[in-house]
Amino acid sequence: MSSAPKRTQRRALTLIRSFANAVKSRFSSDKPQPRQLRRAQIPVFKHAHFIRRLPVELLAYVFVLSSEDDVMLPVRVSHVCKKWREIALRTPTLWRRITLSPEINMWKERIRRAGACTLDVQLVPSATTRWPNSARHYLDPVTVQWYMQPAISLIRRWRSLEIVFADYSPYLWNAALSGCCSRSQRAQALALVDLTLAYRANDDTKEFCLFSGVAPRLRNVTLDGIRLTWLPSLFGNLTYLDYTHHGFSVEHQAVHDVISMLEVSNRLVELKICFPPKRRPATPTRSHPVTRRALLASLQHLHLRVEGCDIPFELAHLMTLVHTPCLRSLRLIDVDRRHLSFPSLKSFFFVYAISRSLRVLRVEHGCEGSAHARPGA
């Protein structure tokens, strides 16, 4: 009886060995393996989104470009995943745009994350920080000064400054620009390239001297409703100027003021100018015509904007005093889009000598809609 279990065990071991040998011989290396059992190298990004295949530098550049249209995009991308957050925190240029608003602590943190990078400072009426579709918030002098406080000590790092006021309140420019008008070296805008100051309802006749008179890299300026001291060390290197006259001077005095500005900014490539109908003059006016002329040897594009019923005297007289030998395009624009625009258009072109280099002439929103002309090339 004792030999029976031993025989059973031997048979079982024999069957196991034969089965193992059969499997081993079937899938030996010298014979082709079945397709479903072959080993394959699976790509690392086979099932990953294509954006994860981008190099870190290219992804950071996409973030920076996108942040120009959405000020809160750096915060959003830093909350997507751990990798994106690390990229965002290690990209100082992504945090350079500072839109001043009640979230002061948030903007201070963004300034810290920007490191030594230059800053784009904005103070605009729309609340575009946390709730993009929210209503416009009202700005008073105390609030404006409170908003400007975190950025005013960093003037030397400003790459651009944009201040726009939509609602009237007295002394807004004083509150916003008091720190910029200091005579100390800290107020010098050594990195400033773009400057935008707009406040059409301004009634403060004060003339502001910005940045201790030093902004060597300033190239693009947009002004509306403010008087500035026009120094060569500030505005001597401009290539773009969008100027709307403040209205505190009219007629010959206004023409004299603008001619003095153009004599300083004689490197302009593009000029946009407007003399809107505004309040009474707050400064004495000249009684005799202006005879000084300005040479804009590099000017190629000239935009003349008209607000009111007709081309103002100041604009017509100014154009007789400006010499533009390289002008290529001239646009005369009716901002109000009236049905019958520019009644004195014929007289204007009678006194304005069209440059021989002109190639495109556009009269927009006139009595015939839009007129296009190409003087002989």
Image: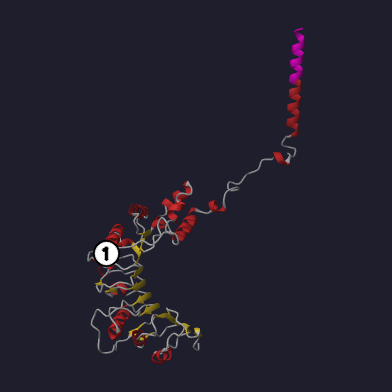
Q: Quarter-wise, where is residue 18 in the image?
A: top right
Q: Is residue 363 visible?
A: no
For this view, does 280 lie left or right of residue 307? left
The residue under label 1 is: 175
Residue drawn 75% across the image and 19% down it: 12
Residue 134 within the segment the image draws in magenta = no
Residue 344 on image: x %, y %: 41, 89
Residue drawn 47% across the image and 57% down it: 63
On-image quarter of the N terminus: top right
Q: Amino acid at mark 1?
A: Ala
Please say if 47 is above or below 264.
Answer: above
Colour mode? secondary structure
Q: Quarter-wise, where is residue 254 in the image?
A: bottom left
Q: Residue furthest top?
A: 1
Please say if 134 is above or below 239.
Answer: above
Residue drawn 45% across the image and 50% down it: 78
Nearest the camera: 339 or 66?
A: 339
Task: Specify start and end residues of the magenta stretch as a single range.
Answer: 1-13
Residue 342 on image: x %, y %: 42, 86
Disc tally is: 1
Q: Main SS of the magenta segment?
A: helix
Q: Quarter-wise, where is residue 248 in the image?
A: bottom left
Residue 9 within the segment the image draws in magenta = yes
Nearest the camera: 123 or 220?
A: 123
For this view, does 212 lie left or right of residue 24? left
